[in-house]
């Protein structure tokens, strides 16, 4: 099943109703729920993004907030759309007003370094969220999407460590979500993270790169990333051409915006075998109609065919 995805964001606010309005009739098969945050290196609680008061998992159990925020989207996707796979994004941009509490990967790494009951509880919390989503009839798999936007120098080791910890606990598929551009003559730390995961497991649970092509990643060229992965050794990636999935944006605050009539041509130009939309909270306004998820998802399907 090729990646035809959408990032569902702002689900604790107006993004919830916007998503539910846009789901019916869409052919989006991959629902990427944005995002999970760990706000402290001393607490295993998982909260919803920058909403530190919205705890999704604690003490090894999913909280009622999961039923308020996450599962309604996936249930609607299965029942009224084409959802088959769900992904839980770990991380996001760091809130400069509260950097410590929104440095998700740094906090997770601290917990992994601590080990013991704290680490065990964190991993059970991730498992509880995956189980809550996976229990919805029609969902075929639940994976995790790694959106690391913290210290560039620590990227490879931290992303690899978190991915390994999650995979060893859940045996689930994983995606990486790079926005950092390729640098001439240097290997991307995202590819180094791939190599570290593969070297440790002798198998590759990372099934694709959700590559940002907007905002900080606006200069990313998916074909160049495909070539970089192909040229790297020991990544465990069998088909680099089918591994890089661009994310195109419909959000005016995450330029450049790609309008529906531009989607297929852009993806065909990149020879993309999968793609996603950032992000449903911006649908249907403020873009001119028709900009519904159904239109975008159909354009993505055409572009990756």
Image (cartoon, rainbow, N blue to C red):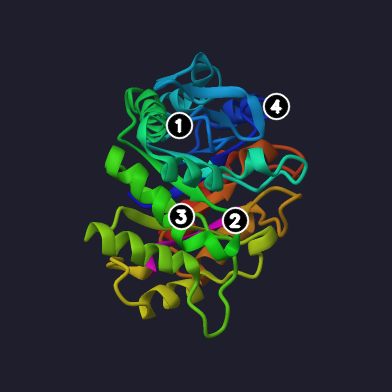
Query: Which tag is nearer the camera, tag 4 or tag 3?
Result: 3
The magenta segment is 241-248
Residue 194 lies, in percent from the top left, at 38, 63
Residue 159 is tagged as 3
Q: Is residue 27 visible?
A: no
Residue 110 lies, in percent from the top left, at 50, 44
Between 122 and 79, the one lying in front of the other is 122
Identified at 58% across, 35% down, the residue is 40
User: Which quadrant would the C terminus be assigned to in this image?
Assistant: bottom left
Kind of element beneath mark 1? loop
Q: Earlier in the sequence, mark 1 or mark 3?
A: 1
Q: Is residue 36 left or right of residue 123?
A: right
Q: CA distance from mark 4 to mark 3?
A: 31 Å
Identified at 51% across, 55% down, the residue is 177
Query: Which tag is nearer the camera, tag 1 or tag 3?
Result: 3
Identified at 52% across, 46% down, the residue is 297
Q: Earlier in the sequence, mark 1 or mark 2?
A: 1
Q: CA distance from mark 1 to mark 3?
A: 32 Å
Count of marks overlaid on the render: 4
Tell me which corner region of the image, top left, top right, bottom left or bottom right, holds residue 75: top left
Question: What residue sits right under mark 2 in the picture?
Answer: 248
Residue 130 lies, in percent from the top left, at 38, 31
Query: Which tag is nearer the camera, tag 1 or tag 2?
Result: 2
Identified at 70% across, 27% down, the residue is 14
Query: Which tag is nearer the camera, tag 2 or tag 3?
Result: 3
Residue 148 lies, in percent from the top left, at 55, 53
Between 32 and 107, the one lying in front of the other is 107
Residue 66 lies in magenta, yes or no?
A: no
Is disc 1 in contact with disc 2, using a CB cutoff of under 8 Å? no
Question: What residue sits right under mark 1 in the picture?
Answer: 81
Question: What residue sits right under mark 4 in the picture?
Answer: 14
Is disc 1 in contact with disc 3, using a CB cutoff of under 8 Å? no
């Amino acid at each position: 099943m090729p990646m035809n995805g959408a990032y569902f964001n702002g689900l604790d606010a107006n993004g919830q109703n916007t998503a539910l309005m846009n789901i019916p009739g869409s052919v989006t098969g991959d629902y990427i729920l944005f995002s999970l945050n760990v706000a402290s290196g001393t607490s295993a609680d998982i909260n919803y993004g920058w909403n530190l008061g919205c705890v999704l998992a604690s003490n090894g159990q999913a909280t009622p907030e999961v039923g308020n925020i996450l599962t309604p989207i996936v249930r609607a996707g299965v029942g009224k759309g084409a959802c088959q796979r769900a992904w839980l994004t770990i991380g996001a941009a760091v809130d400069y007003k509260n950097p410590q509490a929104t440095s998700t990967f740094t906090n997770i790494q601290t917990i992994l370094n601590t080990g013991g009951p704290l680490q065990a509880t964190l991993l059970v919390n991730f498992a509880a969220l995956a189980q809550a989503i996976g229990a919805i009839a029609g969902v075929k798999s639940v994976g995790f999407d790694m959106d690391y936007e913290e210290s560039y120098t620590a990227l490879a080791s931290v992303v690899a460590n978190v991915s390994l910890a999650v995979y060893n606990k859940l045996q689930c598929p994983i995606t990486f979500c790079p926005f950092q551009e390729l640098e001439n003559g240097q290997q991307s730390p995202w590819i180094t993270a791939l190599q570290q995961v593969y070297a440790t497991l002798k198998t590759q649970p990372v099934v694709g790169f959700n590559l940002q092509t907007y905002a900080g990643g606006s200069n990313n060229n998916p074909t160049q990333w495909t070539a970089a992965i192909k040229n790297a050794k020991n990544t465990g990636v069998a088909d680099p051409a089918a591994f890089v999935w661009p994310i195109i944006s419909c959000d005016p605050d995450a330029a450049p915006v790609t309008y529906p009539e531009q989607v297929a041509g852009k993806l065909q130009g990149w020879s993309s075998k999968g793609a996603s939309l950032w992000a449903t909270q911006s649908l249907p306004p403020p873009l001119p109609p028709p900009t519904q998820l159904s239109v975008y998802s159909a354009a993505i399907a055409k572009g990756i065919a």
